[in-house]
């Protein structure tokens, strides 16, 4: 079996700090933040890295919000992505993610709970995250969860918080946006802000 | 030794001699024969026997004459070489066959040598029979209708256990429950009974039968087995059997149309074309009716929130001949709290399409 490379994300500035922002294999990574904070852009870049390396990925889309066009523009190979739409049903999303994680073989399993209703999120049993942590531990799968607030608590190995910086408008086009990635877990000296700027031609 | 039949009912005649038949065209079938079959084949008008496949085909298409007598035009057309033959005065296959092979190879290359071997009836090539299309089937008619899934699966399992060892792999399972036909196309060739039974179970659970079956028929469509070359350094991928079962379970949970591989379409329709920016967009499906306050036609407030930056309008329309045509003005905007949205206006209404994230 080959040793899979950790996945990172493309940044324009400070590439030397990329190492601290890598998703650990066989662990849960949480990407948290408010709407328009760059969570989905970061997820697309993880998907682009994974599919670029020939791995297969799954998007469990709890609110039918995935945009294949912008994922493809970010470099993701759509042929290697399985898209599961759950029509705003968090319970279905969790069940689908559970089946996918236990099936195995995927490089990235992305669980999109970014716009999921708060009531549905509160109903997720804490044991789910423990089970998933155990299920992916011996595998090279990355479980990337995007939410508004941390959900997996102690079960996640990496939590990054995304915040909005600025957006560049030019004439009749939105040209670029700038976000900030702040690792919230693990804590320590690596807790450094990282700026990501997305260009139309990037 | 090969025989070729050139008749309208060639396929049926050929299959009465051999199961391995190569169909050259609709009315020409070639197959290998044993010495015992010689006498029977010679009685068929339009049949020819030769040492090689190609010679048998040429002879069957030109009955009543030997190869040597046939004109050069019976060979596969090659205008450039045939023009040279014409200049050399080569008119029949005998003329071509008598040419010195070395000289021909020097002047016309390997294609010339190949044509000469064809003319001599000495071009050897293996027979390419069509794959066998054998339908394997089992059926049962019970005294009573089966109302539960478990006994039905028990019967289907018996069918599969009986049929699967007879084939190399199955491409599809064709069921008939009473008079209700149902086909289960397999994502990859397999004859794993456990896997097939699980697939049938998920299919029956997600699409229940209209009435309890009393008469059950199963036809297994055979196909060639899959051959996969694994690489040492290729990343791990989901096992096809496991993946298909998982997807079948998920389809039963969220619906058939909600599990798919995303694809881009060749259209300018909003949401279908590739954007310039890798900036991710999140759709609100369906778009949310929006309350927008405007000033001289330019949006100033969205749901009462002040718009601080604005880009647009980006006018888009198309496919006017279809009922789902679109004609709208799009705006990208930033609210005071920093959220980036895309709104659009149709003839009379504003909608919130999604947010940049």
Image (spheres, coloured by chain):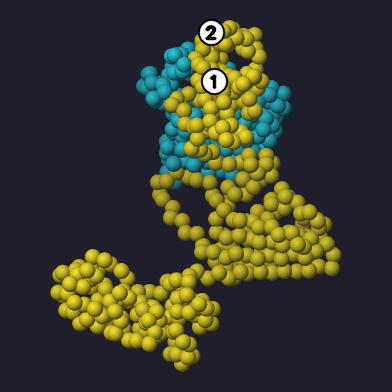
Q: In this view, does B180 lie above or below A137?
A: below
Where residue B109 sits, quadrant-wise, is: bottom left
Residue at position x 26%, y 80% in the image? B93
Do the CB atoms of the residues marked 1 and 2 lie less than 8 Å apart?
A: no
Image position of B31 (left or right of B203): left
Question: Could you tell me how far apart the alpha carbons at marks 1 and 2 are, in whole angstroms?
Answer: 16 Å
Where residue B94 sits, quadrant-wise, is: bottom left
Q: Colour of chain B?
A: yellow
Q: Tag 1, which secondary structure?
A: strand
Q: Mark 1 points at which residue?
A: B330
**In the rendered structure, which disc, 1 or 2, sits on the residue that comes first in sequence?**
2
Q: Is residue B248 above or below residue B121?
A: above
Residue at position x 62%, y 9% in the image? B293
* Subunit ID for the residue under disc 1: B
Q: In this view, does B1 lie above or below B157?
A: below
Q: Colour of chain A?
A: cyan
Which is nearer the eye, B284 or A46? B284
Q: Name the residue under label 2.
A: B308
């Amino acid at each position: 079996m080959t040793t899979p490379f950790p996945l990172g994300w493309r940044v324009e500035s400070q590439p030397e700090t990329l190492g601290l922002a890598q998703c650990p294999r066989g662990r849960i990574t949480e990407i948290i933040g408010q709407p328009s904070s760059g969570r989905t852009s970061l997820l697309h870049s993880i998907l682009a890295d994974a599919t670029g390396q020939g791995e297969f990925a799954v998007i469990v889309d709890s609110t039918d919000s995935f945009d294949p066009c912008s994922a493809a523009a970010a470099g993701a190979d759509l042929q290697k992505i399985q898209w599961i739409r759950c029509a705003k049903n968090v319970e279905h999303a969790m069940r689908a993610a559970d089946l996918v994680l236990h099936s195995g073989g995927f490089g990235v399993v992305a669980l999109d709970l970014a716009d999921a209703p708060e009531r549905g999120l509160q109903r997720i049993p804490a044991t789910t995250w423990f089970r998933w942590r155990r299920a992916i531990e011996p595998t090279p799968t990355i479980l990337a969860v995007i939410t508004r607030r941390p959900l997996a608590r102690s079960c996640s190995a990496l939590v990054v918080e995304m915040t909005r910086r600025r957006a560049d408008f030019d004439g009749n086009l939105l040209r670029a946006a700038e976000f900030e990635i702040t690792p919230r877990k693990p804590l320590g000296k690596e807790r450094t802000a990282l700026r990501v700027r997305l260009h139309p031609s990037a | 030794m090969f025989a070729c039949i050139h008749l309208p009912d060639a396929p049926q005649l050929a299959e009465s001699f051999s199961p391995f038949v190569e169909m050259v065209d609709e009315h020409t079938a070639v197959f290998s024969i044993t010495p015992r079959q010689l006498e029977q084949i010679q009685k068929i008008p339009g049949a020819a026997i030769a040492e090689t496949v190609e010679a048998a085909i040429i002879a069957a298409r030109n009955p009543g004459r030997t190869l040597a007598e046939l004109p050069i035009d019976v060979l596969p057309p090659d205008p450039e070489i045939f023009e040279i033959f014409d200049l050399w005065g080569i008119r029949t296959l005998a003329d071509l066959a008598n040419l010195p092979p070395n000289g021909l190879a020097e002047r016309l290359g390997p294609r010339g040598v190949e044509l000469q071997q064809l003319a001599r009836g000495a071009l050897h090539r293996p027979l390419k029979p069509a794959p066998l299309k054998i339908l394997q089937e089992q059926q049962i008619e019970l005294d009573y209708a089966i109302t539960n899934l478990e006994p039905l699966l028990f019967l289907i399992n018996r069918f599969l256990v009986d049929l699967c060892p007879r084939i190399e792999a199955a491409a599809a399972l064709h069921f008939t429950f009473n008079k209700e036909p149902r086909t289960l196309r397999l994502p990859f060739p397999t004859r794993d009974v456990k896997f097939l039974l699980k697939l049938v179970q998920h299919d029956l659970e997600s699409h229940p039968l209209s009435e309890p079956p009393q008469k059950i028929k199963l036809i297994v469509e055979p196909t060639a087995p899959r051959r996969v070359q694994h690489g040492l350094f290729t990343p791990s991928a989901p096992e096809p059997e496991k993946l298909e079962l998982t997807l079948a379970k998920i389809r039963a949970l969220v619906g058939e149309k909600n599990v798919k591989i995303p694809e881009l379409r060749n259209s300018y329709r909003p949401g279908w074309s590739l954007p310039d920016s890798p900036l991710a967009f999140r759709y609100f499906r369906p778009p949310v009716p929006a309350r927008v306050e405007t000033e001289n036609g330019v949006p100033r407030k969205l749901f009462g929130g002040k718009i601080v930056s604005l880009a647009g309008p980006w006018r888009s329309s198309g496919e006017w001949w279809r009922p789902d045509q679109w004609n709208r003005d799009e705006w990208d905007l930033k609210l005071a709290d920093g959220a980036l949205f895309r709104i659009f206006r149709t003839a009379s209404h504003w909608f919130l399409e999604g947010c940049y994230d």
